[in-house]
Image (spheres, coloured by chain):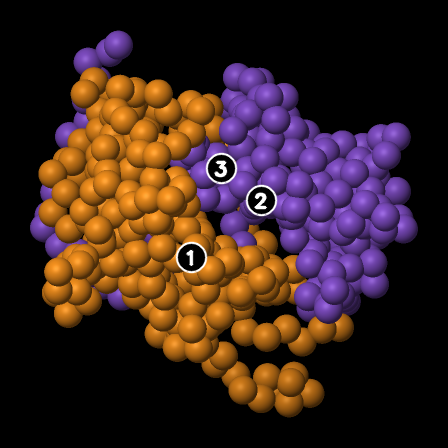
Chain colours: A purple, B orange
Amino acid sequence: MSEFAPRYPVTPGDQSTATFGPTPSQTVGPYWKIGLDWGADGENVVPADTPGRITVRITVIDGDRTPIADAMVETWQADADGRFGTDGFRGFARSAADETGTATVYTIKPGAHESDTDADEAPHLNVGIFARGMLDRLCTRLYFPEDLAAHATDPVLAALPETQRRKLIAEKSDDGYVWTVYVQDLDPNGVETPFFAI
Amino acid sequence: MLHLPPRFARPDGAHPPLDFPDYRTTALRRPAQPLTLIPQRLGELTGPVFGEDRVQEGDADLTLAHGGEAAGQRIIVHGRVLDSDGKPVPHTLLEVWQANAAGRYRHVNDNWPAPLDPHFDGVGRCVTDAQGNYRFTTIKPGAYPWRNHHNAWRPAHIHFSLFGTAFTQRLVTQMYFPDDPMFFQDPIYNSVPAEARHRMVSVFDYDATVDNWALGFRFDIVLRGREATPFENEEDDDE
C-alpha cells in the first residue's frame, strides 16, 4: 500500500454557521444497496403483463473498459403519449448493475413530447448513474434507434455534433434495447458517452 | 410550443467536482470530457413522486431489529427538507443507510474486523410532513477504515437519498457529525468546496435531546429551488 495520505485544513463549524444553500452531493459509496436497493420492484416501471413492455439493458463501463458492477442506474420517462407523471404510470426505475455492469429496466417506450422550442423532444429515457467513485450523479439520455426523423430535430440531440449524437442511441435487441455507457475516454474523439449538466 | 414553469437554479459552488484525484476511485469513474449544459425541459422539471407508499411502520426507527435493540449511542436525527428558496418540500421520501456503532456495514463486501450487530440493519425510510419536517431514531455510526490511502478512515456519517419534485432535484448526500476528528484526512468530505462543506455537518441539538433516552442532532437538507422569473409578462413582451 502506498503511503499517500492527504491532509486538509479543517475549519470548525456546522450547519448553524454555514451559508444557506444547496446541500452538496456525496457519493453513494460501495454499500448503497443497504438503503436503496428496490430489487425487482425498482426494475419494473410496468408489470410483466403490460402490452408493449420492453427490456432495456444499460451497461456501464469505466475508463479501463471494466464494467462498473456496483453502479446504480435510475431512469425517468414520459408515458406512451409523451406525458410525465400521469396517474398509474410510475415512469421511474432504479436498477442495480450486475457483474457485467448491466442494469436492466422493464418499461414501455415513451412517446415524443413538446418542448419549449418549435421542435418536439424525441422519445427518450432520462438516465442518472450513481456509483462509488462518483461524487455526483452522471446524467445522460437514451434514445431509440427507430426514431431517426425525430432525432434530426430533437433540441438536445441538435445541440450535439453528429459523432456525439450517435452515442446516445440504443441498439435494438430481441426483447427491447441495449445501450452501453462509457463513463470515460481521455480521447476527445473516443467513445465517452455525452453527459449533461442539467 | 410549451411554456415551461420556472427552471431550477444550478447549485453553483455546492457540489464536488467529479474529478478529485485524492479519492482514488474517481480516476476511472469520472468523465474526461466536459459535460454538455442543456436547458431543463419537461423531463428535467418533473420527477417521480414517492411518499407513504414506500414506507412501513417502524422504518424511521433503526434501533429495533430482529427482536432486539441496536448497541451504541441512541440518537434522534431530525430536520427539514427545503429548497434553496427556503420553501419546505412536503411529503417527500427520504432513504437513509449507515454503518453500525462499530463502523461495520451489513454488506457482503464489508468484512473488516469489527462486529456486526444482530439488532442493526442500518436502513431507514421516512416521509416529510406538510412542513417538510422529518425524524429518524438511530444509533451513532462508527468511523470505518477504507483502502483509499494509508490509515484512511471515513468520518462517521449517515447516507441520505432524496427525490424532491423533479429529476433535476434528485440528491444523494452524507450527513456528518460536528467536530469529527477524521475530517482532516477524508477526501470525500473535502471534495466539496470549502464554502459549502459545513452544510453537510449536523448540529448537536440539546432541544431535541430526550432526557434519559437519546441525543438529538439537527440536519436540514436543501434541494435546488426555482430560478427567479424576471419577466412576469414575457409572453406579452414578445408580441
Q: Earlier in the sequence, mark 3 or mark 2?
A: 3
Q: CA distance from mark 3 to mark 2?
A: 8 Å
Q: Which mark is residue A38?
A: 2
Residue at the farthest top position: A1
Q: Is there any visible trace of residue A157 in the rendered image?
A: no
- Chain ID for label 1? B
Residue at point 36%, 66% (across, down): B134
Chain letter of disc 3 in the image: A
Query: Label 3: which residue?
Result: A33
Residue A189: x and y in percent read 62, 26
Q: Indicate the secondary structure of the residue bearing disc 2.
A: loop
Residue B133 visible in the snapshot: yes
Label 3: few (<14), some or many (≥20) within 10 Å?
A: some
Kind of residue sitting beneath label 3: Lys
**Structural distance between the alpha carbons of marks 3 and 1:** 19 Å
Q: Which residue is mark 1?
A: B58
Q: Nearer the viewer, mark 3 or mark 1?
A: 1
Q: Residue furthest front?
A: B67
